Amino acid sequence: MPSDNSAEPDDELKTLFRRGFVVFWLGLSVLGGLNQNILPGVYERTGWVPALFPHLRWSYVMFNKMPDEMPVVDFRHLGAGEEYQHLGKAIPTPAVGYSMSRATVNYYYYRSDYLRHICSVSSEMNNVEFRIRLFQIIDREKGITREQARILNTAYQECHDGRLSDPVAG
Amino acid sequence: MDGSRTQWPVKIFAAFEGPCNPYPLAIFRIFFFSGLIIHFFPSFIWFDDNYLPNIMRSGNWNMWLYEDFLKLPHALVIICAFLTCAACICGLVGLWPRLSAMVTGVGLYTFASVNSLNVQSLALLFVWSTLWIWAVAGGGNEVLSLENKLEGLSPRPGDRMCRGLIGWYLMLVLFFAGHEKLLTHWPQSEEMTALFKFPAGIVVRGPWVHLPHEVQRFLGISIGLATVLVQLGVPVLTAFRKTRLYALIVYELFFIGIVTVLNVPLLFYLVMAPGGLLLLDDEHFERLRWFRLEEKSGQAQGTETQPEAA
């Protein structure tokens, strides 16, 4: 809606508001983009901004740096002669198309608390053994080598009647 | 002098003002709300595993909501969940998109704050922003909407503000994601090669993990470099009319590449990839007969192209 001399005052006000919002929104987004590096911490220091504009919270970071080590959890029902299956097949709330990533990332952040949660909410996870293998993805001293990730250590935990045992080194 | 004085704001804001082909925003709306439904509805269906006070929860958004929202009566919490789901479905079918975006935004943000254990994703940043813009600017129900059917309305031109703001915000996200990678010396650090070293299916889809090391290294370096170039280049090239179409084709290929290689939530693809449509010129879009408004409604429509630079 281009403004011209014949425009109604209401239209002019509306145009002014719309343009103001465009400038405000894009300006704020640029500041949000700079928050993580050039202007670190600006966003967090302004108490009302995080509540009102949550989209600026983590700047726009995607896949910046991979972790050097990653724990991978699989499970099997005890006494059933089963092969180990990835934890992604046991998560109670489905993650459509990416259940293995969801389970791995949740375990990465919450460790035993996450297994305890799965153990307590899922009735299918009774008499289950969890196998936790810690993989070394990158050896930063050697750089990226020919080999795939190697197992640094393995631990086991069991779930019986909604209760999770302490980890036992394998 | 007066003429040029009144013209420059029109030029600057042309990407956000005036009538436009309504199909890009309507198609984006369908993908966007489908993504939200696929991502969030499981947590509502398995409600007791996600939104009861005594289960394990993760607070990544608003801590006040995390601590206090579940102190409300349980019936009220369930009503809020129902309203949120209803708003998502209304958004999908194009019923009252402004109101739908408002309720969806407040509802999903509240429940993600209460427990983000099963819904956390970086794509949520773009979701909050898009819903915010939609709640202010409205639109998106001019075609492909149930509202048209119910009220007997014919297809009509859309308004460029919502479409332009979501599209250009998306380009800012892309640009700053590239800028961030430059600051962390991304192309040299071979982070993408490291991705291929993860156990199969965790981050990278199975087949890529089993490739020979040399191929992984070549792909890792190529993808790493291409990612930085795409993220920094596409937003700039999209600003110019001559290069816009090619830049947006690269943008779409980039997202197809991401979901082919990485095991990411569907939400990520469904909200980000269709965003490229929002910045296409109407004339590009209307080369496909299905998206010509005049043939369907007999109405005149604004077919202005986007400005040279926004």
Image (cartoon, rainbow, N blue to C red):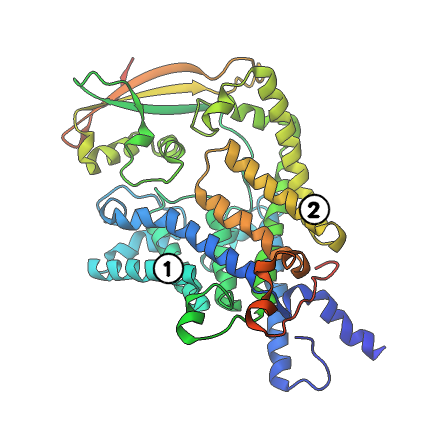
- Side of B179 where A133 appears, left or right: left
- Quarter placement of the N terminus of chain B: bottom right
- Side of B253 where A114 appears, left or right: left
- Quarter placement of the C terminus of chain B: bottom right
Residue B64 visible to an observer of this rendering: yes
* Chain letter, disc 1 residue: B
Task: Check the image and report above or below for A136 versus A45.
Answer: above
Residue A91 rendering spot, x and y as whole percentages: 29, 35
Task: Check the image and report above or below for A140 versus A3.
Answer: above
- Side of B40 where A49 appears, left or right: right
Residue B179 rendering spot, x and y as whole percentages: 65, 42
Q: Secondary structure at mark 1?
A: helix
Residue B98 is marked as none
List the residue tagged with mark 1. Answer: B89
Which quadrant would residue A9 be assigned to in this image? Answer: bottom right
Task: Check the image and report above or below for A34 versus B141.
Answer: above
Could you classify mark 1 by the number of other residues whose Cα lies within 10 Å: few (under 14), some (14-19), or many (20 or more)? some
Which residue: 17% across, 28% down? A126
Could you classify mark 2 by the number of other residues whose Cα lies within 10 Å: few (under 14), some (14-19), or many (20 or more)? some
Q: Real-space Cα distance between discs 2 and 1?
A: 34 Å
In front here: B221 or A144?
Answer: B221
Which quadrant would residue B3 be assigned to in this image? Answer: bottom right
Q: Secondary structure at mark 2?
A: helix
- Residue flagged by tag 2: what amino acid is it? Tyr
List the residue tagged with mark 2. Answer: B246
